Amino acid sequence: DSGVTQTPKHLITATGQRVTLRCSPRSGDLSVYWYQQSLDQGLQFLIQYYNGEERAKGNILERFSAQQFPDLHSELNLSSLELGDSALYFCASSVGGSESSYEQYFGPGTRLTVT
Amino acid sequence: GQSLEQPSEVTAVEGAIVQINCTYQTSGFYGLSWYQQHDGGAPTFLSYNALDGLEETGRFSSFLSRSDSYGYLLLQELQMKDSASYFCAVQGTDKLIFGTGTRLQVFP
């Protein structure tokens, strides 16, 4: 158990809909990262937040957005969903900012299925 | 741009030694990490190299050569439970970039 929690574990929704994925980092960690992993693919970095502020952006679509709240939990919002958005979405956390990004602790993931 | 290359699949038998290579091309390099991911599971951190040389952690060792933009993960005394995907990841200036992963299958 990494100490990172993600909800929900599974999500099935239809094209065009909007969903929100939630993540709580390990106690004491200030950075939260979001990744997308499609079938048999690597981990695609989406976005990083550090202590409530956006710190780094990857290949995140405009239809996707995220935020980190004062209690450090984070939410990833996916809108106008398409079939290709079906994937496993991981949240990870690390103690500090980019300097500690090499060691991240991953949550169990949310499996999103868009039908 | 940034790119990482690692073999897609490696097979070995129990008790053997296997090496998973990773070459990278990146602007702004701070270090190379390795993660393990079992099927259906979350990635877990294995090791990190910021300087050239070998880092040993139990049965696993990781090596880095910054001049060659190359690293490897060495797994010794392989066990069935080592069957998993292994990802190298480059720590850049502002994010961690993952390779596409190497699927290791260990046979009895």
Image: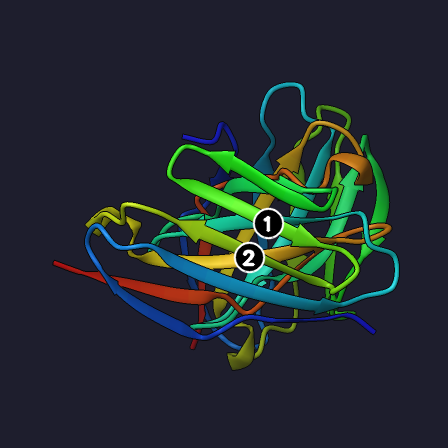
Q: Is residue A106 visible?
A: no
- Residue at 52% x, 33% y: name it: A4
- The chain letter under disc 1 is B
Report the amino acid beneath label 1: Phe
Q: Counting other residues with Cα less than 10 Å from the Cα at mark 1, is it few (<14), some (14-19), or many (20 or more)?
A: many
Q: Residue at x 37, y 50 (%)?
A: B41
Residue A78 x %, y %: 64, 62
Left or right of A16, for residue B30: right
Q: Chain of mark 2?
A: B
User: What amino acid does circle 2 point to?
Assistant: Tyr
| Residue A59 image position (x, y, % from top left) | 74, 68
Residue reaching furthest to the bottom: A83
Can you say which quadrant of the picture contains the N terminus of chain A?
A: top left
Please identify the quarter of the rendering in which residue A11 is found. Answer: bottom left
Q: Are marks 1 and 2 in contact (CB under 8 Å)?
A: yes
Q: Is residue B81 left or right of residue A9?
A: left
- Whether residue A90 is situated above or below residue B22 in the rendered picture: above
Residue that numbered label 1 is attached to: B63
Q: Look at the picture and state if B60 lies above or below B24.
A: above
Secondary structure at badge 1 equals strand
User: Dot 2 lies on which element?
Assistant: strand
Q: Earlier in the sequence, mark 1 or mark 2?
A: 1
Residue drawn 37% across the image and 59% down it: B18
User: Which quadrant of the view contains residue A103?
Assistant: top right
Q: Residue at x 72, y 46 (%)?
A: B52
The C terminus of chain A lies in quadrant: bottom left
Q: Is residue B8 above or below residue A107?
A: below
What kind of colouring is applied to the model shown? rainbow
A2 and A74: which one is in front?
A: A2
Tell me, for residue B72, which label it has, or none. 2
